[in-house]
């Protein structure tokens, strides 16, 4: 692996944090370099210093940042992940939504290759509490590569490690060495590219009844976490819900939300009239 000077590492780390919010501390130095090495090779650059200059000054830098987003993202996901939260959604929370409107709008804010938003769509369909026309799932990510995969709706075995056989049979069709998702589910999800640090775009995406941003905050430092979850308040309906990963928490981060503690899951509800 190419050697990198401390100043070059700091420059790259800070540029990435500023652009995407992803934070690589000193312990993640090797991880960052391993991911960037492929981009240096693709651009024909021989040093990290040259790559820093490329990102700062080259006319092709904008396209490189788009490609870099796919390299930096951790796209580990699968269908029906953290099932306890899905159960919480379809119980009292969904009834609360339907009491005010027959239409429910959810956002998968870092959807990766699509397993999460499709899981949300299937979960709502399974309840039979609302019509297909009453389900709207928005799914966004910073990586165009994973969004292209998500739009195709084709998945292999690893994506189904938490999927019950009956769900696989009901909502997927065998195709080659994998499965393709049913068109009925696919029609309920719209995909788009979005950087969660773009607060104006985040607000314009709303309003949502609930936002799923699971296993994303762990890649941000505290100031960026606060910035992102508080911008979500502008995209949620009053009393809307925020779902985080099981290892993530809003404790000591913001007071815009109140924790709702269930039997198996904790979710966060936007406080009345709360705005950052």
Image (tube, grey):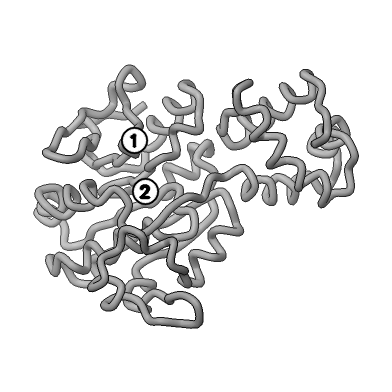
Sequence-wise, which precedes: disc 1 or disc 2? 2
Q: Is residue 190 above or below residue 205?
A: below
Q: Is residue 195 above or below residue 219?
A: below
In the image, 126: left or right of 142? left
Q: Residue 251: which quarter of the image?
A: top left
Quarter placement of the C terminus: top left
Q: Residue 138: which quarter of the image?
A: bottom left
User: What separation in Å lies between label 1 and label 2 (alpha carbons)?
Assistant: 10 Å
What residue appears at the point 89 percent right and 48 percent down from the top-left corner?
Answer: 44
Circle 1 residues within 10 Å: few <14, some 14–19, many ≥20: many
Q: Is residue 115 above or below residue 223?
A: below
Q: Residue 179: which quarter of the image?
A: bottom left
Of residues 85 and 228, which is closer to you in this image?
Answer: 85
In the image, 16: left or right of 11? left
Quarter placement of the N terminus: top right
* Label 2: element kind: loop
What residue appears at the point 32 percent right and 61 percent down from the top-left corner?
Answer: 119
Residue 141 place in picture, x, y as percent: 51, 51
Q: Looking at the rendered structure, which numbered label has been put on residue 233?
A: 1
Q: Are marks 1 and 2 in contact (CB under 8 Å)?
A: no
What residue appears at the point 40 percent right and 56 percent down from the top-left corner?
Answer: 78
Of residues 153 and 98, which is closer to you in this image?
Answer: 153
What residue appears at the point 49 percent right and 54 percent down from the top-left corner?
Answer: 112
Residue 262 place in picture, x, y as percent: 13, 37
In the image, 178: left or right of 86? right
Of residues 137 and 161, which is closer to you in this image?
Answer: 161
- Which residue matches tag 2? 206
* Label 1: element kind: loop
């Amino acid at each position: 692996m190419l050697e990198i000077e401390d100043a070059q590492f700091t420059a790259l780390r800070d540029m990435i944090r500023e652009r995407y919010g992803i934070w690589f501390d000193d312990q993640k130095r090797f991880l960052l370099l391993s991911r960037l090495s492929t981009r240096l090779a693709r651009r024909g650059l021989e040093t990290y210093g040259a790559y820093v200059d490329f990102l700062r000054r080259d006319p092709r830098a904008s396209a490189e940042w788009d490609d870099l987003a796919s390299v930096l993202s951790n796209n580990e996901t699968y269908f029906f992940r953290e099932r306890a939260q899905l159960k919480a959604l379809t119980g009292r929370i969904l009834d609360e939504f339907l009491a005010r409107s027959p239409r429910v709008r959810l956002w998968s804010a870092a959807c990766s290759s699509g397993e999460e938003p499709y899981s949300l769509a299937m979960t709502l369909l399974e309840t039979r509490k609302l019509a297909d026309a009453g389900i709207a799932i928005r799914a966004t990510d910073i990586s165009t590569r994973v969004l292209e995969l998500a739009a195709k709706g084709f998945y292999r075995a690893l994506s189904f490690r938490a999927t019950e056989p009956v769900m696989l049979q009901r909502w997927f069709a065998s195709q080659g060495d994998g499965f393709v998702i049913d068109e009925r589910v696919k029609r309920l999800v719209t995909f788009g590219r979005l950087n969660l640090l773009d607060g104006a775009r985040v607000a314009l995406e709303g309003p949502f009844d609930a936002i799923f941003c699971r296993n994303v905050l762990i890649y941000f430092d505290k100031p960026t976490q606060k910035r992102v979850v508080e911008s979500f308040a502008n995209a949620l309906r009053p009393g809307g819900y925020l779902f985080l990963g099981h290892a993530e928490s809003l404790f000591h981060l913001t007071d815009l939300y109140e924790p709702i503690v269930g039997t198996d899951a904790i979710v966060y509800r936007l406080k009345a009239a709360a705005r950052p």
